[in-house]
């Protein structure tokens, strides 16, 4: 198995925190919609406002919005406790924290709650005063907020977009140096992710062959405490367990945000993500969201249907039926292998690690250039792309330029002629001819002049 791969860089995480109604979501949407180039060419992936993989001045980072933490009808938490909880998670899990206050309204007791938590963090904190549209507010604001201890606030207007470029510059300046996904290039990192109560902890224990204490009852458990090294045959495996992020739901409000930072961290550091679903329930919206994030981060993906013993006892459907439903619900991940098991009883547990090893090999698969061009040439000849205004797409040459995951560069006469449908056709062609099960593929098109073959 080829685990000697190039160094892989993990994106840093930037979290936006603050009390309600200071404009966190508006700021997030402004940064994403106007200033950041979203790194996403995966069809069918639905992104909500909680998360965006983004780029600014050559640095890619994950932007996380802490707004939208709604209180369930049976949730007795008050706003202050929810605000403190989200700030605590961000302070511990994010690499940079953007602390947003309301410049027009001024300081609030809820701001002070966030300040107390921010002062304990070891990560950079950027104080941002939103709603600073008027000159009067800009003049009065510095003195009031400077006493918080984070320096003079950056004045921005999410409504009008003022100051957001300076904010992005400040974020990038404070990002940590890019680091590799693992310190040991021969180590394979696997993240276990999924919704609450699908059996992630049970699966971790079953893989390790022992009961293990999950040090994650409270938010912010350090990520090193939930990494476990174990040996599978001759391979060193780092298991990144995200099970702890789901604990004590009643104490931390909505699960959406509290799971996001830890899931992002785990996915960013892994080579392969195992998305654990409940075989009794099938794919739900949060499963779709996690699958989308995994593929946006260009990681290997395996879907594990846990609790298969219970589903089998009911006898209402067969594995083939559930596989078909899963494929229909997450068509953008149709290449991911699906396995069913019971972490509790150990039934079919032996099917998981061979699937992991196969996906690991496929991540590092390199296609011989001559074979690649033969396949692309035959596909284009048999199914040419529709001409645009009479101009046909011509693909001259293809080469695989990266592995882990594979990236292909196709030289053509005009990249603008490549439709999303034709891009998907070419990806299907590669998958049909070469084994890339469980692996996202990147196809990039570069113009080349037809006359002399120069780029």
Image (spheres, grey):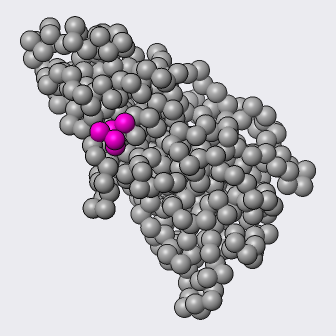
- Residue at the (31%, 62%) spot, across then down: 74
In this picture, is 121 found above or below 441? above
Residue 104: where, in percent of width, then height? 13, 23
| 379 with respect to 358 (left or right) | left
Query: Is residue 81 located in the magenta-colored stretch of the structure?
Result: yes
Which residue is at the front of the view, 408 or 34? Answer: 34
In this picture, is 280 found above or below 13? below
Which residue is at the front of the view, 324 or 67? Answer: 67
Q: Give the range drawn in magenta.
A: 80-84
Which residue is at the front of the view, 56 or 368? Answer: 56
Q: In which quarter of the image is residue 146?
A: top left
- Residue at the (47%, 20%) spot, across then down: 124
- Residue at the (48%, 54%) spot, across then down: 248
Image label count: 0
- Residue at the (74%, 46%) spot, across then down: 228
Q: Quadrant of residue 150?
A: top left
Q: Is residue 368 visible?
A: no
Q: Find the residue positioned furthest to the bottom.
A: 315
Quarter of the figure that contains the C terminus: top right
**Main secondary-structure element of the magenta-colored stretch:** helix
Query: Is residue 58 located in the magenta-colored stretch of the structure?
Result: no
Residue 77: where, in percent of width, then height? 32, 49
């Amino acid at each position: 198995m080829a685990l000697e791969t190039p160094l892989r860089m993990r994106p840093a995480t930037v979290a936006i925190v603050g009390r309600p109604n200071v404009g966190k979501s508006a700021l997030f949407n402004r940064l994403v919609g106007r200033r950041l180039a979203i790194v996403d060419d995966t069809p069918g992936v639905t992104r909500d406002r909680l998360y965006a993989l983004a780029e600014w001045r050559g640095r890619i980072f994950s932007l996380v919005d802490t707004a939208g933490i709604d209180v369930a009808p049976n949730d007795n938490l008050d706003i202050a406790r929810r605000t403190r909880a989200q700030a605590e998670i961000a302070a511990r899990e994010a690499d940079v924290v953007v602390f947003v206050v309301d410049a027009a309204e001024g300081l609030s007791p809820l701001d002070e709650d966030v300040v107390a938590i921010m002062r304990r963090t070891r990560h950079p904190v950027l104080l941002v005063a939103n709603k600073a549209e008027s000159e009067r507010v800009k003049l009065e604001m510095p003195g009031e907020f400077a006493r918080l201890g984070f320096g003079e606030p950056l004045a921005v207007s999410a409504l009008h977009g003022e100051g957001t470029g300076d904010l992005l510059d400040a974020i990038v300046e404070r990002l940590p140096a890019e680091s590799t996904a693992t310190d040991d290039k021969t180590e394979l990192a696997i993240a276990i992710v999924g919704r609450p109560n699908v059996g992630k902890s049970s699966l971790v224990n079953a893989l390790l062959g022992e009961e293990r204490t999950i040090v994650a009852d409270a938010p912010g458990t350090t990520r090193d405490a939930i990494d476990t090294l174990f040996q599978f045959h001759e391979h060193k495996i780092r298991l990144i367990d995200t099970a702890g992020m789901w604990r004590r739901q009643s104490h931390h409000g909505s699960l959406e945000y509290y799971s996001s930072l830890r899931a992002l961290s785990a996915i960013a550091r892994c080579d392969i993500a195992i998305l654990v679903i409940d075989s009794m329930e099938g794919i739900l919206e949060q499963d779709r969201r996690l699958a989308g994030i995994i593929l946006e981060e260009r990681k290997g993906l395996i879907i594990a249907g846990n609790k298969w013993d219970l589903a089998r006892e009911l006898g209402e459907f067969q594995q083939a039926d559930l596989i078909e439903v899963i494929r229909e619900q997450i068509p953008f991940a149709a290449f991911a292998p699906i396995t069913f098991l019971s972490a509790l009883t150990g039934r079919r547990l032996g099917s998981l690690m061979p699937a992991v090893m196969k996906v690991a090999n496929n991540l590092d698969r390199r296609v011989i250039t001559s074979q690649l061009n033969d396949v692309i040439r035959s596909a284009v000849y048999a199914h040419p792309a529709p001409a645009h205004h009479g101009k046909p797409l011509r693909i001259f040459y293809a080469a695989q330029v990266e592995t882990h995951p594979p990236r292909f560069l196709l030289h053509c006469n005009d990249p603008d002629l490549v439709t999303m449908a034709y891009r998907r056709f070419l990806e299907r062609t590669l998958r049909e001819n070469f084994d890339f099960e469980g692996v996202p593929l990147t196809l990039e098109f570069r113009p080349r002049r037809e006359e002399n073959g120069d780029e």
